[in-house]
């Protein structure tokens, strides 16, 4: 089975999306005869045509991106628009998606997920499905066992996909935990993330005292 | 009211769309508003790189020095912002989405609870209401409209404002004008 994995993260090779991708691909490649090509969208922005050709020559494609303002980043949408000329042609791959967001709840991704399924239909591709994961930012401040669990699930989802060509819905649901949070959980989590992640980064940049600056007031 | 219209039509040959936007702006001006159209395709707006420097290094200002900085300021100084785009495969043009991605300096990185979900804190006390003006594609059906409307609603929750309307330029523009007026 052949897979082209298109990493749409604007951060390129140094992204959280890439960490999830790596584990998925590790699982996918466990099946003999499978091969996977990784393409970074940031390297193709000046010439999307070449990536469109790579797309149409693929058997399966997964496009991965971080959630930006509730949808795909503008640069990922540029590529999705570049695919329009090959819609409903004979040589298009099966298409799936992977997305992660910084918000801890995977619920934030469910709206763009509906769009991605519809987009795939508009393009005329068979829809593989979407792998959705909340809590994708600040992996370094999260308990190690939780991060490992997510990576392991990505591996298992990749493994199953490599064997069957399908995404296992039970594994997708496990990966997506927590889908949403109770108020008490939010109240426990938010101060930790604000202090450890954001204030930590602000302090590293000597910008903690400027955190609430309002340049346009 | 100060109304800013982001025209996200990438196609200079789609005269119907641009004419509709101009008519819409004129109708707003006729009812006493100050309406300004920004043609995004004439602006230099590079895509967000996800560096977070606008949150952790130069809070409130993007480090990419291009036209998005000026738009970010205009956004905050408006009472109402209208996002205008022809639907392209069922969603905003990449041109408009790239501009929206560059608006995050106007939020604060800290999280807080909003109606049972986690969202970012506000950087400013108030934000302009958001209206959305679209143009249907040949294939646009009710499912597309529901999906894009939900994406707009979610975006407005996340950027801490409210969605005033989603209308189509091929329908009555008066309805969109009324929606701005009552909001």
Image: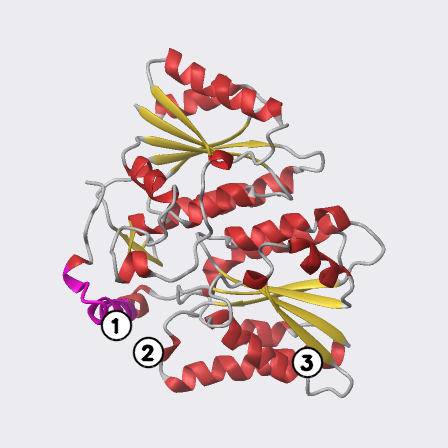
- Label 2 vs 1, first from the N-terminus: 2
Label 3 or label 2, whichever lies nearer to me, is 2
The residue pinned by badge 3 equals A160
Q: Secondary structure at mark 2?
A: helix
Is A194 situated above or below B101? Answer: below
Work out how far the residue at label 3 is from the one at label 2, CA to CA, in angstroms. 29 Å
Identify the residue position indicated by label 2 in the image. Answer: A141
Q: Position of residue A55 (x, y in %)?
A: 72, 61
Q: Are marks 2 and 1 in contact (CB under 8 Å)?
A: yes
Specify the segment rendered in magenta: A189-209
Q: Nearer the viewer, residue B57 or A140?
A: B57
Main structural element of the magenta stretch: helix, strand or loop? helix
Whether residue B110 is visible here, answered yes or no, is: no
Cα–Cα span, label 1 and label 3: 35 Å
Rendering coords of residue B100 (x, y %):
43, 45
Task: Identify whether B161 is placed above or below A51.
Answer: above
User: In 3D space, how far apart are the residues under numbered discs 2 and 1 (Cα atoms)?
Assistant: 9 Å
Q: Residue at x 55, y 24 (%)?
A: B18
Q: Quadrant of the N terminus of chain B?
A: top left
Q: Which mark is residue A192?
A: 1
Residue at the far top: name it.
Answer: B30
The answer to whether residue A212 is seen in the rendering is: yes
């Amino acid at each position: 089975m052949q897979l082209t994995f298109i990493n749409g993260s604007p951060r390129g090779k140094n992204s959280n999306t890439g960490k999830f991708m790596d584990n998925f691909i590790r699982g996918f490649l466990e099946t003999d005869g499978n091969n996977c090509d990784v393409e970074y969208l940031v390297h193709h922005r000046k010439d999307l045509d070449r990536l469109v050709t790579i797309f149409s020559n693929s058997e399966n494609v997964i496009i991965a991106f971080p959630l930006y303002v509730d949808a795909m980043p503008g640069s990922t949408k540029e590529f999705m628009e570049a695919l329009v000329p090959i819609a409903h042609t004979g040589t298009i791959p099966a298409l799936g998606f992977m997305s992660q967001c910084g918000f801890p709840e995977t619920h934030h991704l469910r709206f763009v997920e509906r769009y991605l399924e519809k987009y795939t239909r508009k393009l005329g591709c068979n829809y593989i499905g979407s792998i959705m994961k909340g809590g994708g930012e600040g992996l370094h401040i999260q308990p190690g066992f939780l991060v490992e669990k997510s990576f392991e699930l990505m591996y298992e989802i990749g493994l199953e996909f490599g064997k069957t060509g399908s995404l296992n819905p039970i594994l997708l649901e496990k990966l997506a935990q927590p889908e949403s949070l109770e108020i008490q959980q939010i109240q426990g989590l938010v101060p930790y993330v604000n202090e450890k992640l954001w204030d930590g980064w602000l302090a590293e940049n000597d910008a903690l005292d400027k955190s609430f600056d309002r340049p346009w007031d | 009211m100060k109304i800013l219209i982001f025209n996200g039509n990438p196609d200079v040959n789609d005269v119907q769309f641009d004419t509709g936007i101009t008519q819409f702006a004129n109708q707003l001006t006729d009812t006493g508003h100050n309406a300004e159209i920004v043609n995004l395709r004439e602006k230099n707006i590079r895509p967000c790189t996800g560096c977070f420097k606008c949150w952790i290094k130069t809070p409130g200002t993007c480090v990419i020095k291009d036209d998005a900085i000026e738009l970010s300021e205009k956004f905050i100084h408006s009472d109402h912002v209208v996002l205008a785009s022809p639907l392209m495969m069922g969603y905003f043009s990449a041109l408009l989405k790239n501009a929206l991605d560059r608006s995050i300096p106007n939020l604060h990185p800290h999280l807080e609870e909003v109606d049972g979900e986690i969202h970012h804190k506000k950087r400013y006390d108030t934000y302009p209401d958001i209206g959305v003006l679209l143009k249907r594609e040949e294939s646009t059906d009710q499912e597309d409209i529901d999906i894009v409307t939900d994406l707009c609603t979610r975006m407005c929750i996340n950027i801490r404002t409210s969605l005033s309307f989603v209308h189509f330029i091929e329908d009555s523009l008066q309805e969109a004008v009324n929606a701005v007026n009552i909001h």
